[in-house]
Amino acid sequence: VKVSPEIKQGEWFDVETHQGHKFVAKTPDGEILKVFDVQAAPGDRQEFTVGERTKATFFNKMGQNIRLFWINSVTGRGIAVSDLIGGGASHTVYTSPGHKFAAYDENENQILEFTVTAHFGDHEEFYIQEL
């Protein structure tokens, strides 16, 4: 059963589904690109990507531990994507262009916010340091 229109690079499609469902991404000619198995529990969100993901590396140049959060563009809420990152360390995430991230200190004070501008398949670096 076809569940979406043709999705071009950089576009996305949202569908409500259930754990255990299977989806197949195909080219317009019918070539199978990827098969996805839904593993998310009811109420949770699961994302799938066809093609290369964008990478973002965050370098902690501060003298304190930080934690990274992805900012949900719909709810505005942050979701932790790292454990504590010590000074001088870095953390890399796979993401998409336009995604927003925020760095917080151990006291949950926001230090900086970042928006990924790299294209699909590219790598972008962010530096977290004292202003």
Image (cartoon, rainbow, N blue to C red):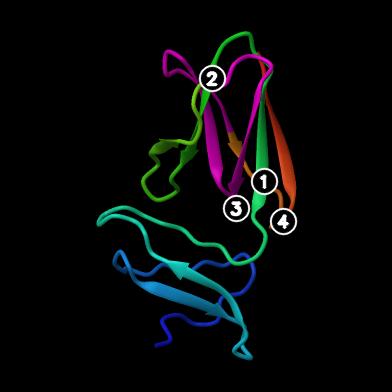
Mark 3 is surrounded, within 10 Å at the Cα level, by few (under 14), some (14 to 19) or many (20 or more) other residues, namely many
Q: Nearer the viewer, residue 47 or 117?
A: 47
Which of label 4 and label 3 is nearer to you?
4
Residue at coordinates 43% horizontally, 86% vertically from top-left? Answer: 2
Q: CA distance from mark 4 to mark 2?
A: 26 Å
Q: Which residue is mark 4?
A: 121
| First in sequence: mark 3 vs mark 2 | 2
SS assignment at label 1: strand
Residue 131 visible to an observer of this rendering: no
**Residue 66 occupies quadrant:** top right
How packed mark 1 is, by other alpha carbons closer than 10 Å (few <14, some 14-19, many 20 or more), is: many
Q: Return the residue at label 1.
A: 55
Q: Secondary structure at mark 3?
A: loop
Residue matched to label 2 = 66
Where is residue 24 drawn, in percent x and y? 49, 77
Q: Amino acid at mark 4?
A: Gly
Residue 128 on image: x %, y %: 65, 23
**Secondary structure of the residue carrying numbered label 2:** strand
How far apart marks 4 and 3 lie (CA) works out to 9 Å
Q: CA distance from mark 3 to mark 1?
A: 8 Å
> In the rendering, at what x and y percent does residue 59 appear?
68, 26
- Image quarter in which the N terminus is found: bottom left
- The amino acid on which the numbered mark 2 sits, given as a three-letter code, is Ile
Amino acid type at circle 3 is Ser
Q: Quadrant of the C terminus?
A: top right
Which residue in the structure is indicated by mark 3? Answer: 96
Give the alpha-carbon distance from disc 1 to disc 2, as whole Å.
19 Å
Residue 92 lies in the magenta stretch: yes
Q: Which residues are magenta?
A: 85-113
Q: CA distance from mark 4 to mark 1?
A: 7 Å
